[in-house]
Image: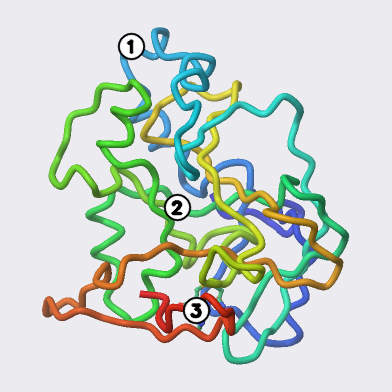
Amino acid sequence: MACDESCFDAELHLQGRAAPEFHPVSSCRPGQAEAAWRLVRPRGAGDFTAGRLQAMCQGLPAPLAAFEPREPLQPPQLRVQWMGATGWGAVAAEALLPGGFVCFYAGELLADAEAEARCTAPGRDAYLFNLTTAKQCRKLGAEVVSTGDEDNPVYVIDAYVKGNVGRFLNHACGPSFEANVSPIYLFGPEDVVDARLPRVAFFANRSIAPGEELRYDYGMPPEAVLSPSGGVRHQSCLCESRACRGRIY
Ligand SMILES: C[S@@+](CC[C@H](N)C(=O)[O-])C[C@H]1O[C@@H](n2cnc3c(N)ncnc32)[C@H](O)[C@@H]1O
């Protein structure tokens, strides 16, 4: 679902630099997700309410702390800015309070295998956001048919070509002062709740001043990314945090 700039929830300042092949889409739904959304709607959806999910998630660590917000999420003003060595980044254009909503992560919704198949170039994986694994879905009380590794996501959001401001958030190793936002799986009341298809929303870990870059820990294990030939790929980290692990993956 490509759409015009009115869909974009951030003030975009691309400063004359093109973000190659990138098309902004609404942050309300992952791009192209409508068909997939219908496709995966569970037969027993009526049994599986957001309220029940919320109850079952108490005490689970983020990002599995799925919840239903009490009030509509109000997106703050963000802007996209050239950060130098780490490319484009997202910056707060207004002060954010701890726990405040930052933005969604939108993109194309893909089955995990299709997302992996797209990752032929180095760095490409960093635009994927894994949704819940079969194991996590079970923790959330859902019955899912496993199609492979229990720790692999069932679905993935790919924001490389289509996405919103969420795809511009860079990585900072955490926990640290620099990793100032966290992603949370969110099951909104207006959706047909499917444990495999949470939305991904970012929230502030602390007070954030206007002009601060927004970064989160991508949390990618060191051997998570393989090249098409099966070798392990690494990407150096430039987060400059005291907690820096030296590599994004
Ligand atoms: C999801 S994108 C973030 C937006 C990206 N900077 C851009 O210009 O489109 C992830 C990519 O940003 C860069 N990046 C993000 N965080 C970084 C970090 N801490 N150190 C080095 N590169 C980083 C890497 O190229 C990575 O593949």
* Residue located 15% across and 80% down the image: 231
Identify the residue position indicated by label 3 in the image: 244
| Secondary structure type for disc 2 | strand
Task: Provide residue 245's location: percent of width, then percent of height.
Answer: 43, 78
State if disc 3 and disc 2 touch (CB < 8 Å). Answer: no
State if disc 1 and disc 2 touch (CB < 8 Å). Answer: no
Taking 40 as reference, is 82 left or right? right
Name which quarter of the figure residue 131 lies in. top left
The image's mark for residue 108 is 2
Q: Assess mark 1: CB under 8 A from ligand 1? A: no
Amino acid type of the residue tagged 1 in the rendering: Gly
* Residue located 57% across and 84% down the image: 86
| Secondary structure type for disc 3 | loop
Amino acid type of the residue tagged 3 in the rendering: Cys
Identify the residue position indicated by label 1 in the image: 44
The image's mark for residue 148 is none
> Is residue 31 placed above or below 187 in the rendered structure?
below
* Residue located 32% across and 31% down the image: 137
Dot 1 or dot 3: first in sequence order is 1
Dot 2 or dot 1: first in sequence order is 1
Q: Nearer the viewer, residue 152 or 2?
A: 152
Crowding at label 3, few (<14), some or many (≥20) Cα neighbours within 10 Å?
some
